[in-house]
Image (spheres, rainbow, N blue to C red):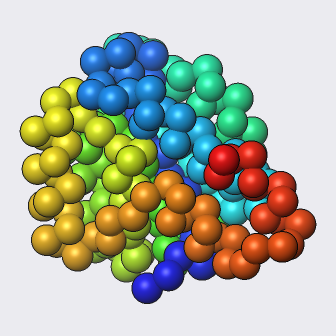
Amino acid sequence: MLIRRADSLLLVVDLQHKLAPAIHDSERVTANSVRLLSATSQLAIPAFVSEQYVKGLGPSLEVVREAAGHAQFFEKTHFSCTAEPGVLDQLRAAKRAQVVLTGTEAHVCVLQTAFGLQAAGFEVYLVADATSSRTPENRNAAIERLRAGGIRIVTTEMVLFEWLHEAGTDDFRKLLPLIK
């Protein structure tokens, strides 16, 4: 049940310019997603970033783009990333069984993506402190529904420490600024 660095990838859903200001606790969601993106770069973990209907919602936030150096970006119009043609193939090509999932909106794109990933055979770990909606009620209802549906609910620090697995290593020292 632990998240394993060699078996996981990160998927950040729709942290975009025109949507972010409307999201409850947007600064924390963005900051924690950026922490995870930064960690994937340092630990050589595959990362993916979706952008919902860029024409209407704009591109990903600049801080997300900066932190996502090695990440693969893809645009989508479906709410679920897994319904977008080619995306499941991209994720499967990473040859990872676990997906660490963050983003917005929890009750729409994140929820539909989580269940789509689960149906495709992935173990899904939703990062609760890096996921939200426009209202706390929608966020909370989504997390409750996802948990009841078998999605594992975690926090940013859980992910970071499980990826690291032990203290006193070079990787631990590299990620320490992200933890403090």
Residue 35 at what x, y percent from top left? Answer: 61, 44
Q: Farthest residue toward the bottom?
A: 1
Nearer to the camera, 97 or 157: 157
Nearer to the camera, 166 or 17: 166
Identified at 67% across, 39% down, the residue is: 68
Identified at 53% across, 59% down, the residue is: 157
Q: Is residue 138 visible?
A: yes
Identified at 43% across, 58% down, the residue is: 155
Res 88 → quadrant: bottom left
- In the displayed structure, would residue 80 be above or below residue 94? above
Identified at 35% across, 44% down, the residue is: 131
Left or right, 89 with respect to 80, comes to right
Q: Is residue 96 visible?
A: no
Left or right, 62 with respect to 98, comes to right
Residue 59 at what x, y percent from top left? Answer: 51, 21
- In the displayed structure, would residue 87 be above or below residue 150? above
- The quadrant in which the N terminus is found is bottom left
- In the displayed structure, would residue 33 be above or below residue 26? below
